[in-house]
Each structure stands twice: as C-alpha cells, then as structure tokens.
Amino acid sequence: MKITIFCVGSRGDVQPYIALGSGLRSAGHQVTIGTHSNFREMAETAGLQFSPVEGNPREILQTEEGRKWIEADSNPFSFFAGLIRLSLSLFDLLARDAWEACKNAEAIIYSPLGLCCHSIAEKLKIPACMAPLQPLSATTFFASPMFPPVSLGKFYNVSTHKAAGQLIWQPFRKAFNRWRRDTLNLPPYPLWGPLTTMRKKNEPILNGFQSFHVRRIGGVDVTLRVTGF
C-alpha cells in the first residue's frame, strides 16, 4: 500500500512519525513522509520517500513573532494563540504541500497540525487517520491543558476539551472552508469542525504515546486508541 505520513513541527514532532514510517516500510508498504526539508536526510536514511513542506520551524522560531510565542510557553492561552497565528500565516502553503505529498497515496496518517489531510483523504476517497503524540481528545478523566487542572468532575473535564477544540478550530474555519470549496470542491465543514464529522463517521484516532503516561483516556469517544510509541 502507498501510505503518506504528513507531519509538521520540530524534531520532536517529526521523528516519531519517521520511526512509524520505517516500521510500515519494513511491513512491506511504500511510505512517503511529508515534512520540512531539514528532516529530509533523516527520512531518506530511514528508507522513506520524501515530500517537502515549506516553513522551517527553526527559522520561524527565530522571527520576532516566533520568539514571542516561545516566551508565552508558561501561559497556555497565549501559547496556543501564538501557535494559531503562526499556523494561519502558513495555512495556504501547508495545504498546497499536503496535497502534493498525498495526491498519489492510498492511505494517509497525519499529525494534528496536518488536519488538512482529512479533507484531502475525503477528496481522494481514501482512508485517513489522525495520530496525535499528545492527548488532545475529549475525556471525562482530566481537563484540557488549556484550562486549570482542578477537580470539578467529569462534566468540567469534557467541557474544557470541547471548549479548547473550538478555541483552536474557529480561527481556522473560514480558511479551511474556503480552501475546501475553492480548491477541493468539497462542502464546508459544520460549524463545530471536522472532529464532529470524524466522530459521526467513527473514524479512528490513534494516540502515539504509552498508556502508562496517560492511564485514562477516552470515556467520550469510542474510536480512540492508545497504541504506544
């Protein structure tokens, strides 16, 4: 099978997917990884085909905007707001490069920042799977890291995850739906975003971390799986 793995970010965001790609290649699949050019050598050494993604994270972090984002690390809201601003500025380039990486694929695995691959898979009518490296999905067992980690019960925990998802999704909604309409000729996502669509279709989310790091995840979405590293 021709599989594209699409991921963006720093080395910590990319290297685990290269390891996954190496494993899939050993299992007999043809694997292309779409990521930044500074990881080309690492990917090709692992025997993977490479498709470049514009936007070097190191260069971005050296800009004034990037430095402000890193300095906001202790404030979750400021940190995510900075991430959204930087990602919005690169959205059109990211969507273009994602299409180039995925257009010949038979299946797609993507990191959360590569969410445009969900639309590409829909256009190509092929399976796709989001594979986070951190717990991002709604759960009854703990609150979103964007909110205070107080013990207010299951309703509070689920509500914080849903609110965090909307704080991230809504700034992207117009750009996403414009791209879906103008480039992919697809209908817009619903108001609450693609995760709603994914849940309705029972699309799996594979979490790439060990269960002992997050002993309890799920409780809301039966499609979640904690696969380990």
Image (cartoon, helix red, strand yellow):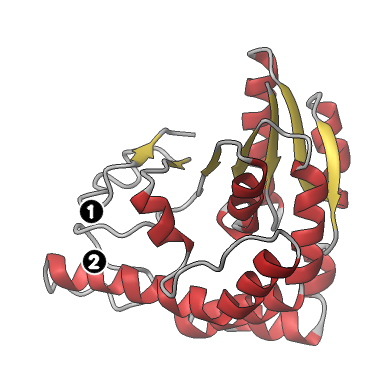
Residue in the picture at 68% in, 39% down: 5
Place residue 22 in its image quadrant.
top right
Are there few (<14), some (14-19), or many (20+) residues within 10 Å of tag 1?
A: few
Residue in the picture at 38% in, 61% down: 196
The local secondary structure at tag 1 comes to: loop
Place residue 101 in its image quadrant.
top right
Q: Quadrant of the N terminus?
A: top right
Residue in the picture at 80% in, 72% down: 60
Vertical placement of residue 99 versus 189, above or below: above
**Amino acid, disc 2:** Val
Looking at the picture, tell me which residue is in the foreground, 136 or 42: 136
Are there few (<14), some (14-19), or many (20+) residues within 10 Å of tag 2?
A: many
Looking at the picture, tell me which residue is in the foreground, 215 or 96: 96
Residue 91, label in figure: none
**Is residue 4 in view?**
yes
**Is residue 73 in view?**
no
Marks 1 and 2, how far apart in space? Answer: 8 Å
Q: Is residue 14 left or right of residue 164?
A: right
> Could you say where residue 29 lies in the image, as x and y percent from the top left?
69, 18
Q: Are marks 1 and 2 in contact (CB under 8 Å)?
A: yes
On the image, numbered disc 1 is attached to which residue?
Answer: 220
**Amino acid, disc 1:** Val
On the image, numbered disc 2 is attached to which residue?
Answer: 158
The local secondary structure at tag 2 comes to: helix
> Could you say where residue 171 lies in the image, as x and y percent from the top left?
56, 82
Looking at the picture, tell me which residue is in the foreground, 90 or 42: 90
Vertical placement of residue 7 versus 55, above or below: above
Q: Is residue 206 left or right of residue 211?
A: right
Looking at the picture, tell me which residue is in the foreground, 192 or 8: 192
